[in-house]
Image (tube, rainbow, N blue to C red):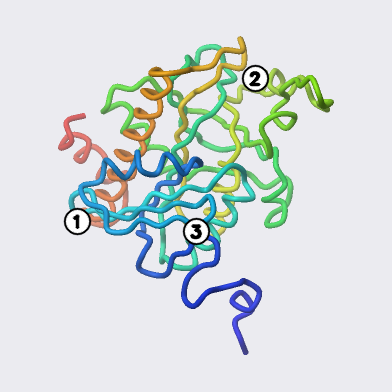
Amino acid sequence: MPDPSRADAPHSGEREYHIDLQRGELAEYVLLVGDPGRVPKVASRFDAVELERSNREITTATGRMGDMRLSVMSTGMGTDNVEIVLAEAMAITDAPTFVRIGSSGALQPEIELGDLVISIGAVRLENTTSFYVHDGYPAVAHRDVVWALEAACRELGYRHHVGLTATASGFYAPQGRAMHTLPVRYPDLAEELRRQRVANLEMESSALFVLAGLAGLRSGTICAAYAQRTNGTFVEGAAKEAAEARCIDAGLAGIHLLWEIDTSPGGADPHSHWSSLIGRRGG
């Protein structure tokens, strides 16, 4: 019998339809960014780039940092795009690790503009994942990725916070933003999430966590705070570029640390290797 998953999905030869990649072109360590323009900023930190490809809003670069082979790819905005990218990326890899490098709005007053936020899980304010799991199903980041991102931020000396993220299905009404032209059903959403101790609000992480978790894969998210929803301020200009650069640095350092653990003698148990690796890296 034919494979129903192959029969239902459009393909062009061996390439996945939307990401335009085939097996061997995507590494097992993948950094995800929303903005295609962020891909070259991440890839510029690689020691070598072996592949660059763009299709629609999905841009991919694969290369190496030292002995580590890794990829960075854009998803575009929203959980529906994340669902497409992950489904196709999983089809051409074996056991990938996904780390999202993104931007978000801070919901807690102690999070300053430009700070980094590491997600431990996500409130599912979207319905993409409801086509996979029950509405009460939690969206949880993998603990090893959370630890690696925390270690990276500490080593780099970057201000960071660890907490819950809320993932919305859009930018305006789905995040409770007031508009002059359209009604907003939940104008107090941001304040309600703040009272529930949610750290930040963005548009992708819950889909990443749910789908990666269902596939038995590791995933995590680190976001820069571009907006502070408690006072309506936004980061701009050079400060925004610096926050993005810190987020990229921390994401790269975190995923590289996971690779170091995975390839260390004794296997991929971060808890048995953690102290020695951080010490070796100068943390």
Disc number placed over residue 177 in the picture, else none:
none
The amino acid marked with disc number 1 is Pro
Q: Is residue 110 above or below residue 88?
A: above
| Disc 1 secondary structure class | loop
Q: Nearer the viewer, mark 3 or mark 1?
A: 3
Residue occupying the far bottom of the picture: 1
Residue 95, placed above or below residue 203 = below
Looking at the rendered image, the disc whose residue lies closer to the viewer, 2 or 3, is 2
Between residue 215 and residue 39, name the one nearer to us: 39
Distance of mark 2 from mark 1, alpha carbons? 43 Å
Q: Residue at x 33, y 55 (%)?
A: 62
Q: Is residue 53 left or right of residue 63?
A: right
Label 2 crowding class (10 Å Cα cut-off): few <14, some 14-19, many 20+?
some
User: Where does label 2 land, which residue?
Assistant: 194
Picture coordinates of residue 205, whole percent (x, y): 56, 41
Q: Which mark is residue 265?
A: 1
Taking the spot 58% from the left edge, 42% from the top edge, the residue there is 77
Q: Which residue is mark 3?
A: 216
Residue 241 percent across, percent down from the top left: 39, 25
- Verify CB contact (< 8 Å) between mark 3 and mark 1: no
Instruction: Give the quarter of the image for residue 278.
Output: top left
The residues tagged by marks 3 and 1 sit, at their Cα atoms, a distance apart of 23 Å
Q: Earlier in the sequence, mark 2 or mark 3?
A: 2
**Residue drawn at (50%, 60%) of the image:** 19
- Disc 2 residue type (three-letter): Arg
Element carrying mark 2: helix
Q: Residues within 10 Å of mark 1 (few under 14, many from 20)?
A: few
User: Can you say whether 263 is above or below 238 in the image?
Assistant: below
